[in-house]
Image (tube, rainbow, N blue to C red):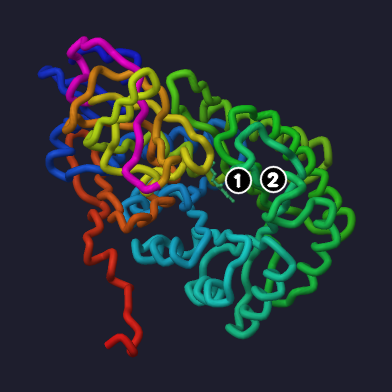
Amino acid sequence: MIDLDNRINREGFSMNNSGNLEFDRCEIIKLAQKYKTPCYVFSETIIRKKCRQYVNAFSGRNVTFEMLYAGKAFLVKAMCNILKEEGFSLDVSSGGELYTALSAGFPPDKIFFHGNNKSKAEIEFALKEKIGTMMVDSEYELDLIDQIAESLNTKVGIILRVAPGIDTHTHKYIQTGQVDSKFGISIDRAPDFMKKVLSKEHISYNGLHFHLGSQIFVLSSYVLAIKEMVKLMRKIKDLWGIDTTNFNLGGGLGVKYLESDLPPSIEDFVNLIADNVENEIRKNNLIMPKILIEPGRSIVAEAGITLYTIGNIKEIPGIRKYLIVDGGMTDNPRPILYEAKYEAVLVNKINNNLPEEVVTIAGKCCESGDILIKDLKLPSASPGDLLVVFTTGAYHYSMSSNYNLLPRPAVVLVNQGKDDLIVKRETYADIVRNDTVPEWFK
Ligand SMILES: Cc1ncc(COP(=O)(O)O)c(C=O)c1O
């Protein structure tokens, strides 16, 4: 094995004896030849490793816990199989995610249904399938769930999503726990809201939830949120005599996109949560609830990469050189949404020691903002070169679109030298599959 330089010294990457870059022991150039580009590649080894890091970190603590995975980050049937085998529960946030999980045979009792405007049809679907827990986001939804449960002659366990009024140090579009948020019940209204919950015949109160946001590096926001949420548990106990038996702290742990990113480790995150929940519960003289968390990004982000082929190269002397790839904001909307930053290398020029130049990686969509990476140092590129972008496992495939009617890329799973397709590349026929023409044109 050849040593990796800093740009590719990331989890899952290695260089084989022929000097070719591998991901989870699969040669990346061969993957691109076999599956074409653009293409998402996921390492099963890394996904499982992250799952186990969470479970092991909690197992080292004297607490009861349940690990959920937030399906919104990336959910396909193969992912559901991995989660099932790793003993995870699942947070879904739409009928589509629920359908995917059930199609993969995911146990319904281990599913938690999130969302800030679940439709009647989605709630009926979930209750008929006997999913484990409905996460309640509002008063409107509480009434709706109760009515539907009554019509189905069933009783459903709920967890209340509370907005704890805490700001996080992350992009404002991925903050969710602040006062001015479209998600959850404001913390000051929650004690009264409980009266309504307890009055519902077809609902049983199973606990509280908060989610602060995503890509969080500064963990002190969790400390503040835990304090406020445990105070709320105390109020609920004082007002209604009820113990809160499940405490779900959402997801949010940040990951490494850039070499310079230094997110807290999974172990530090879990220890901080366990320490603070234990302390606050003790201080407030309450019974210790089960701790649940629902990470998405920190399980799959670094397990995913995207392969692109360089096509057109446009140089504006003295201004900028654009390398244009065969994908863009359709397979990665995060730069245009959040100004997210990435790093990448040219796989076929990885160890040529060629002089480097500063370039901009642009997508092929009809938007000037469709820029994947600004000011990246790469060896001189030519059309046909293969680019790998790191850390594209979370909120990429799940946020992809068909803008410009581009077919969505294939998704490939790799594991210690094995590779297989987990989502086929869309075809032009897929693009027009639901497209219909009114009778009067026929
Ligand atoms: C309610 C909820 N839980 C969990 C998550 C997962 O967060 P992350 O992917 O940052 O771990 C999200 C994502 O925003 C969320 O909205």
User: Dot 2 corresponds to which residue?
Assistant: 177
Q: Quadrant of the C terminus?
A: bottom left
**Amino acid of disc 1:** Gly
Task: Compare residues 321 and 437 and report the one nearer the observer.
Answer: 321
Q: Which residues are magenta?
A: 347-366
Write the residue at 50% across / 22% down. 261
Q: Describe residue 328's horizontal placement relative to residue 34 as left or right.
A: right
Q: Magenta span has 100?
A: no
**Amino acid of disc 2:** Gly
Write the residue at 68% across / 30% down. 275
Residue 94, percent across and down? 50, 63
**Quadrant of the rendered structure where residue 238 is?**
bottom right
Write the residue at 13% across / 35% down. 30
Which numbered circle lies on residue 341? none
Task: Compare residues 437 and 283 and report the one nearer the observer.
Answer: 437
**Quadrant of the rendered structure where residue 251 is?**
top right
Secondary structure type for disc 1: loop
Q: Earlier in the sequence, mark 1 or mark 2?
A: 2
Task: Compare residues 438 and 276 and report the one nearer the observer.
Answer: 438
